[in-house]
Image: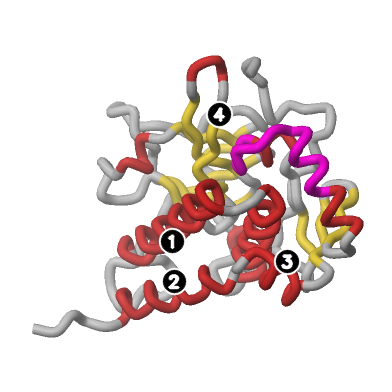
Amino acid sequence: MPNRSWPNSTHAAPPPTVAPIGSSSLAAAEALENLRPGQSLPRTAHDLLAPRLITAGWACRYVTLQGGRRQILGFVLPGDTIGQSPPDRPLNRAQALALTQVRLSHARLRLSSDDRDAPSPTEIAIEEERQLLDHIVRLGRQTAYERTLHLLLELHERLAAIGLADGEAFEFPLTQEVLADALGLSVVHINRTLQRLRRERLLVLHHGRVTLLELPRMKENCDYGGAAAMRASAKILVTQPLPD
């Protein structure tokens, strides 16, 4: 497979708009860097991802294989942090790329119970691990149809949690090339799958915006309930102390 220079594609959608998110208001956060599509996220002198908060735009973590093939490990959305402690975590060694215009700010962790707006290192690690486990299941056991549904539902859920979804609709700046690299499929297969989802009236995709039409049926068709159960277990790990 040739080495593609994504996301600079002729089919690229406009970057998502920025909106204030609750009391933390990502839109008001002080910008540290502004990246163009295709630029790498900053790294430390030890070649690790530098600690940053994504305040606007979409990015991804990925690995590059022989022949220019890429596997996207996961998407980094507004409100997500990268490069967090401990710094030698394997995820911090991955490559990371801006898929749209991206604005970065200083990452802030919750280090005491009085700081409610920032996440704790444990919460960040558990959420990232949950997303990776979901991704393993998608790539390992799900069909192209199920993979695509599952990823769309995850992105909608994450964006809705920070106020960047309008009901069942959200801005979707990913090209088919990027979706193929995320889901381990060919661009042709991605195109056919999206056409099938349209025929089944499960989604509308137009000008970089997607609307999910039947969330219950979509979740049933790709076993999305498993992710919710995993998230509930993760919450117990964060909030409940271990017995002596």
Which residue has dot 2 on it? 230
In the rendered image, residue 160, in percent from the top left (x then y), is placed at 66, 69
Bin the neighbour count of mark 4 within 10 Å (Cα to Cα): few under 14, some 14-19, many 20 and up. some
Bin the neighbour count of mark 3 within 10 Å (Cα to Cα): few under 14, some 14-19, many 20 and up. some
Query: Which one is in front in this view, the residue at disc 3 or the one at disc 1?
Result: 1
Name which of mark 4 and mark 2 comes first in the sequence. 4
Which residue has dot 1 on it? 130
Contact between marks 2 and 1 (CB within 8 A): the answer is yes
Name which of mark 4 and mark 3 comes first in the sequence. 4
In the rendered image, residue 211, in percent from the top left (x then y), is placed at 83, 62
Q: Is 193 or 52 nearer to us in this picture?
A: 193
Q: Look at the numbered disc 1 and give the secondary structure of its residue.
A: helix
Name which of mark 2 and mark 1 comes first in the sequence. 1
Residue plotted at (55% across, 34% down): 97
In the rendered image, residue 216, in percent from the top left (x then y), is placed at 73, 76
User: How far apart in space, not on screen, are marks 3 and 2 (Cα)?
Assistant: 23 Å
Q: Amino acid at mark 1?
A: Arg
Q: Is residue 73 magenta?
A: no
Which residue has dot 3 on it? 165
Per the rendered image, the range of residues in magenta is: 181-194
Name which of mark 3 and mark 2 comes first in the sequence. 3
How many numbered circles are shown?
Answer: 4
Contact between marks 4 and 3 (CB within 8 A): the answer is no
Residue 45 shows which numbered tag? Answer: none
Q: Amino acid at mark 3?
A: Ala
